[in-house]
Amino acid sequence: MTQAANMTRLAIAAMEDKKAEDIALIDISKVSVLADYFLIASGGSKNQVQAMADNVEEQLGKAGYHVKSVEGYQTGNWVLMDYGDMIVHLFDRQNRLFYDLERIWRDGEQIDVESFQQEQK
């Protein structure tokens, strides 16, 4: 398993622990040098979005992966967490619909999260 895949697997589990909604995974490795994966999820409130961000950072930190930068944590409507090979986008519902990253990055490969988690075990 690659480092990016392992980080992504851990981040998905951390988000699921905080009841993330509509988790999406996009493999952007063939269309961008930014990262290998975009991981996108929604929360129902600012507090939930921040709790997901906190848990992702805590769980990945325990595994030895440290976030390079975090943007938007204070407002909690779009938190971006840059892990180098993986970028996490956590939105409130309204901003997720507005920014629609899945449409913007449609050239990337949409990956079924459940299948990804099973393959990485």
Image (cartoon, rainbow, N blue to C red):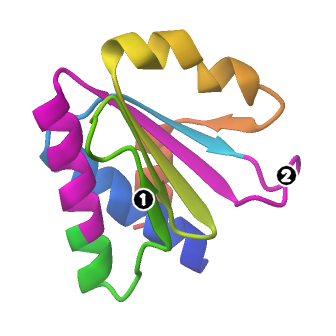
Q: Is residue 31 left or right of residue 99?
A: right
x, y percentage for residue 23?
40, 33
Query: Residue 77 appears in which quarter of the rendering?
Result: top left
Q: Nearer the viewer, residue 12 or 75?
A: 75
Q: How many marks?
A: 2
x, y percentage for residue 60?
32, 74
**Which quadrant is the C terminus positioned in?**
bottom left
| Residue at horizontal 57 percent and vertical 61 percent from the top | 86
Residue 52 is inside the magenta segment: yes
- In the rendered image, the residue lying farthest to the bottom is 64
**Which quadrant is the N terminus positioned in?**
bottom right
Q: In this picture, is 78 found above or below 99?
A: below
Q: Nearer the viewer, residue 7 or 93?
A: 93
Residue 72 is inside the magenta segment: no
Residue range (magenta):
28-57
Which type of secondary structure does the marked residue at label 1 adopt?
Answer: strand
Mark 2 burial class by Cα count in 10 Å: few <14, some 14-19, many 20+ = few
Residue 32 tag number: 2
Which is nearer the N-term, disc 1 or disc 2? 2
Which of labels 1 and 2 is toward the front? 1
Query: Residue 79 appears in which quarter of the rendering?
Result: top left
- In the rendered image, the residue lying farthest to the front is 74
x, y percentage for residue 88?
47, 50
- Residue beneath disc 1: 70
- In the rendered image, the residue lying farthest to the right is 31
Which type of secondary structure does the marked residue at label 2 adopt?
Answer: loop
Mark 1 burial class by Cα count in 10 Å: few <14, some 14-19, many 20+ = some
Q: Give the residue type that dot 1 points to.
A: Val
Q: Give the residue type that dot 2 points to.
A: Ser
Query: Residue 46 appears in which quarter of the rendering?
Result: top left
| Residue at horizontal 35 percent and vertical 58 percent from the top | 11
| Residue at horizontal 24 percent and vertical 34 percent from the top | 20
